[in-house]
Image (cartoon, rainbow, N blue to C red):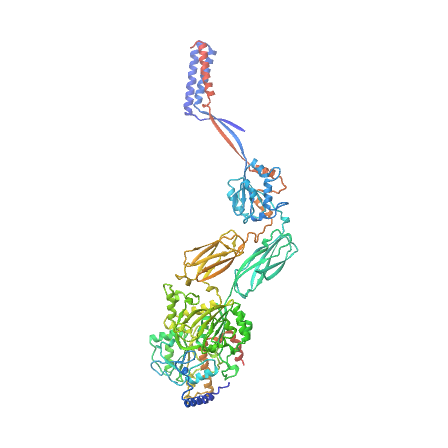
Amino acid sequence: MNLDQMTIAPVFSLWLILLLFSLGVVSVVIQYRLMLGRLGHSRALWLCLLRLGAIFFLIAFALNPSLVTKKEHKVSPAIAILLDTSQSMGQPGGPGKVSRLEEAKALLTEGRNPLLKSLNERFEVRLYGVGESLRTIEVKELGDLKAHGKNGNLSEILKELRANYTLALLLSDGNLKWNEGQPPNLPIITLPVGNPGEYKDILIKAVKAPSLAFRGREVMIDATIKSYGYTGLTLPVLLKEGNKLITAKNTHINASPSEVTVSLSFTPDEVGQKNLSISIPQQVGESLVSNNSVNLSVKVVRDKIRILMVSGNPSMNYRFMRTVLKNDPSIDLLSFVILRTPSDILNVPTHEQSLIPFPVETLFSKEIKNFDLLIFDNFKYPLYLSPHHLESIREFVRGGGGFAMIGGPNLVNEGGYAVSPIGEILPIRFVEKEDYQRDSKAGVRLSRAGVLHPITRLSSDLTGDVTGDDADRLNFWREMPPLDGFNLLEAKSSATVLLESGDGIPWPILTVSSYGNGRALVLATDYSWKWDMGMVAKGKGNHAYLRLVDRMVRWLTKDASMDSVQIALPESTGSVGQEIEVRIKLREEDLSPNLRSVVSFSVFNPDGLRVESKLKPTGQPGEYLGSFLPQKGGIYKLKVETSAGNLEESMVVTGLLESLDASPNHEQLKKVSTSTGGKFLSTSDDLLREIENYSRKGESRFIEEKQSSVWASPFVMIFVLGFFILEWYFRRRWGLV
Amino acid sequence: MRTPSLNRYSRRNFLSLGLGLAAGFCFLSPKSLLSASFPHFFFAQLKYRGGEWDPNPQFAEAIIEELELRTSIDGVKERRVTTLSDPDLFFYPFLYMAGKYEFDPFTPQEGETLKRLLSYGGFLFAEDTAGAKGFGFDQTFRREMKKLFPDHELRRLPLDHSVYQSFYLIESIGGRQKVNPYLEGITIDNWTPVIYSQNDLSGAWSRDKFGKWINECLPGGEVQRSAAFKLGINIIVYSLTSDYKKDVIHHPFIKRRQTL
């Protein structure tokens, strides 16, 4: 509808215009009176009217009249078409469609009148892909579009669009994040794909498991199992370590969909990283198999280091070592001291003495596996142990246990060790028959290997060095008080001598080696306690001795605190496609100048293939940040190598389809459309008509206003001139001119 | 309670001495002399200024003999005499101090040395041999200990203390005189580095060269002497094993035997 209006914009004040007009009228009246006598009433009146008309229009122009033209226009709504491209859209779609994404594409582009084309003709349309983020899609890209990535957050996405669109059309299976509490001011028409009724799947939705467990203590793992379409079925839930089944439990499915939590428990008997999986066998007709298993990694540590110590007799060595071990809350010590040998004579009845039987059979046949470390302190075994006990000890070490033999006079004539299975474990050989040297007053010195070995590489706060130089560490050991006796031993070629006698022949004093999965140590003296009291006598405190015993125990038991490197994994498991960062820390002792800067970081994927990784210093001494980008789910091995030692850790990276609940969630789409004031459509609806009907509600209009000045029209000027011309004509005709 | 046959020791030592004399000391090994190494238990007797530091000079032989006969510990019968300025002081497993009379106070340096020794693992067995309470040595020793350990008093050791269970299950406290039916000690955490007796244990252990007891034990006689030997062995074993008998594994055995 056109609305034309005349408006004025006077160039002078209105009173001036009225005054001019009044003067004009007065002049015309005077003219009439002058011409009345010569021309008569009618002719004079005619001429005066022509003059009056000309004056009227001239003065009227001073009012600056304008003509305003208004025109109403309709605006077509802008529609955003949102196509869900997240991973669940890759699942089988409606009839005949390999995926839900293909089903959605077909809805847009196929048919006699493709929806997308029809909408483009009627509306302003823009196509978007909705995944973890929002991205625009050109129509020509539709063919190559694949479903991948995590579910997008629709609430966040719509915040970006609401300013530019009046309507959004969402094609999705409903697996989107949606915050009902804050609907955006943008109506959404939802168009579902996928068929919830036909979807059949069993998935491990969530797993609750500790990342750290203690050896010998039960570990509980809760797995939440969700199922679609398998009512009445009984499913086994399996907990495995590699291919080895640890435990299994059955669960019965009562409804569809249903969710049930299954608790699986096991008791780890070994320390270390356990790479576990929880799985459910594939069922007939299952849509998605990759979500039937979940990987998890549990680090098993010991709650306490359990030590069995047998001492050949009461001694200073026993007491000092016992004091150190007993004062360490992380150590559980069970010790036996041979207070009386078979040749000693008892002079009182049993109830007057406190001696207890030495439970040899129980300890060395049954209970030995429950210890981490076995210490024989100046102990002559043949009086107490049988060959099968020695076999048991050998198997204990071979299986990963620690064994320490502390020397002394009871080991004279080999202590019976050389020809026993224990001789095989030990890192030394007995070389002489009279193999205990008394009153030697031998000092000790650090061997070349001892400079670097974690047992004897004491930190600078103990050695007092300021340079971190190896010479300081060597001097520190030279200051130790001399030993009053030691066993004359010879190190095996496979052994590492850490301390040796400082005078004359360098007899090995502290020797270590590995045996099977375990470790062995020989301290060839019963005078190590002098390293405690000797330093106390010098006023330097006994920290070095305490640390030495602590280090021996922890090295023998492969305690994590002895690792020269520590890796701090992120608290949550990593995901495919997301960069994972780990913090790497070197131990203080390993930061000596000659060890610094030799750090490498390698990452291996679940197939054992190396993946690209980065390592950069954090700025803190000995701290690095390692990072990598996992491309597939599973258990990754992280390996840090330094010149002081290596460390391997495992971490779980969640696969894209792991724990994926891909069931079409059309209820979610209904919620979205309802809360935004939109509409939930189905594929059976006349989609174009429905969208058109709905879009009318959002149709907007505006009025175009056009203003043109009357002055600007030449016809008006001609019209005004016409008055003057006519007057001139009649004046001439009637003889006034 | 059965008593050990102490007469046998005398006979054996007498024969040993006789044979030794006959063989020109050929039975005495060089390793049994003072130069012997530390695995052999020995007494390091503290010589102090003033008073009488060596009231029972022949105390060591019989108790060491008994120690070797009953336990797996090797001992050296010769004692070492030491002072608080001895550079080897910190390497002596068992510091022994005895006396009857008041002695000179430790110098600050000596006090500091003794305190450091006892705080870091050393062991001191002290005894008042006067045979009565409150005499000179007793007063002086208590005063010196108070100076060294102002926060740890010399207290009576409870009956379940490891020293009463370290080898024998001690029921009565022996000695030359029965002044106190208990031992006293200074306990720091779970370790008692100072044990103090007023019953003159060393007096009960003392024997002359001919194997004859030097002192009579009163009022209990040989039973009291036997108890002194048992207590002596327990103190030595305690000095080398600490609170070993407090380990849980010993509890049921000790409890059962104590109820027999």
In the visual, does A10 lie left or right of A231? Answer: left
Residue B139 seen anywhere in this rendered image of the structure? yes
Judge whether A634 appears above or below B142 on screen: above
In the visual, does B202 lie left or right of A86? Answer: left
Which residue is more in the foreground, A513 or A691?
A513
Which residue is more in the foreground, A626 or A686?
A626
Q: As drawn, which residue projects farthest toward the right?
A: A232
Residue B158 seen anywhere in this rendered image of the structure? no
Residue B25, position as x, y percentages in the image: 41, 87
Residue A637, position as x, y percentages in the image: 51, 58
Residue visible at 62% across and 56% down in the picture: A281
Residue A55, position as x, y percentages in the image: 44, 18
Image quarter of the C terminus of chain B:
bottom right
Residue A158, position as x, y percentages in the image: 52, 44
Q: Quadrant of residue B178?
A: bottom left
Judge whether A18 appears above or below B26 on screen: above
Please give the count of numbered marks on the rendered protein: 0
Judge whether A132 appears above or below A267 on screen: above
Judge whether B161 appears above or below A202 on screen: below
